[in-house]
Image (cartoon, rainbow, N blue to C red):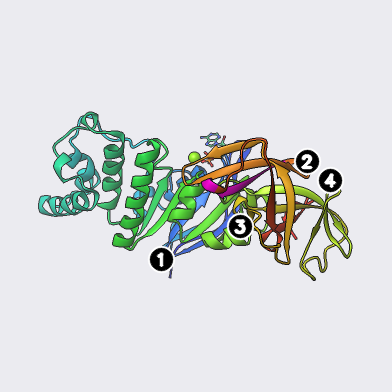
Amino acid sequence: MADLAIRALKKSYGATPAVRGVDLTIPAGEFAVLVGPSGCGKSTLLRTIAGLEEADGGSIEIGGRVATDLRPKDRDIAMVFQNYALYPYLTVFENVAFGLRARKLPDAEVRKRVGRAAEMLGLGPLLERYPRQLSGGQRQRVAIGRAIVRDARLFLFDEPLSNLDAQLRDEMRGELKRLHQELGKTFMYVTHDQTEAMTLADRIVVLKDGLIEQQGSPLDLYERPRTRFVAGFIGSPQMNFIPAEVAPGRGLRLSDGRELPLKAGRLAGIAPGAVLIGLRPTHIARAGAQPPATGVARLSVRADLIQPTGARAYVSFRLGGVETTTELEAREAPRLGEEFAVDLDLDRAVLIDPQTDRVI
Ligand SMILES: Nc1ncnc2c1ncn2[C@@H]1O[C@H](COP(=O)(O)OP(=O)(O)O)[C@@H](O)[C@H]1O
Ligand SMILES: [Mg+2]
């Protein structure tokens, strides 16, 4: 059963459209991540699902029940915000218990639920503290605790980790994934961080200008993007986009005249003309002693930027008139300014029509 079904959902602020007609179905128990650049409508979509904003059109079903006109508290959802919004004058225990007290749950039940959430989130030793006595990560955990005691059907998260420093963010990301597995509830999680999206999601929904650009499993979006936007958004470091011409019968030609042979049939149905070669940094290797396989183009380039990351290094060079990056093992990285040979795995490349920005 779907825990969330949205149809033709629209929301504008005055003349500014924020959500322009979204259809989305999330099956029960799934971890769905809504991702997209700042201002694309992620928060508005989440807030409209929660009932904090009123939709201009369309419908929302939560747990098989029409929720479009229900008040937020009747929607069977719990929400975690980016700014944790804890009550400063209440202890951690009372912050977590707040929603349960408001619903007049018996004290024994409150203690039981808070105890269970505290155990899952490692809050036990902190229950008598006040928010000002907590670190950022601990506060965020309290905010999550407040959501999970609600025992809602659908959990909504709006960039809950973006105020944390990098190390804590990595740690909390793992905890959230574990929490989802333990609770077995439906999560809808908003982020602008594609790494968070890739590591957390069962399903990624890419939003652009208030519309869904593409959705699918993380691997599906990574391997089969349908547009230049998705190709560039998913994956880090970013996919390279190298301009080229389709040379009929031969392959692809770069602006400097060099030709890239392709496997027979790779260009079937593709008209002569300009294309962008979308090639991920991991699909450009340093050439070895063996001759390149079919479908792999070997070229000589000059390293003009080297960014070591520890075990690996990002090495950049000009190709087809644009800056292009490869990801290599640190020990295979060339020196700055060195000429070296790279193998472009064109079998793994996507070809994009620069007129429409769609993958051909
Ligand atoms: N309360 C508001 N009043 C007016 N415009 C808003 C309001 N909230 C968001 N917007 C506008 O709606 C669009 C989508 O915003 P938002 O949903 O916050 O995007 P995101 O969360 O993806 O960054 C943006 O153009 C933003 O400026
Ligand atoms: Mg937002």
The single residue placed furthest to the front in the displayed view is 289
In the rendered view of the protein, which quadrant contains the N terminus? bottom left
Q: Nearer the viewer, residue 298 or 127?
A: 298
Q: Which residues are magenta?
A: 323-331
Mark 1 residue type: Ala
Q: Nearer the viewer, residue 310 or 183?
A: 310
Residue 339 on image: x %, y %: 70, 42
In the rendered view of the protein, which quadrant contains the C terminus? bottom right
Give me the disc on residue 255: 4
* For residue 105, above or below residue 1: above
Give me the disc on residue 321: 2
Kindly check if marks 3 and 2 are in contact, taking CB atoms under 8 A apart as contact: no
Q: Nearer the viewer, residue 182 or 212?
A: 182
Residue 327 painted magenta:
yes
User: Judging from the image, what secondary structure is the residue with disc 1 in?
Assistant: loop
Left or right placement of residue 138 versus residue 331 in this view: left
**Secondary structure character of the magenta stretch overall:** strand
Q: Residues within 10 Å of mark 2 (few under 14, many from 20)?
A: few
Whichever of callouts 1 and 4 sits on the residue coming sooner in the sequence is 1
The span from disc 2 to disc 1 (Cα, nearest Å) is 48 Å
Mark 2 residue type: Gly
User: Judging from the image, what secondary structure is the residue with disc 3 in?
Assistant: strand
- Mark 1 vs mark 4: give the one in front: 4
Mark 4 residue type: Ser
Kindly check if marks 2 and 1 are in contact, taking CB atoms under 8 A apart as contact: no
Q: Residues within 10 Å of mark 1 (few under 14, many from 20)?
A: some
Whichever of callouts 2 and 4 sits on the residue coming sooner in the sequence is 4
Kindly check if marks 2 and 4 are in contact, taking CB atoms under 8 A apart as contact: yes
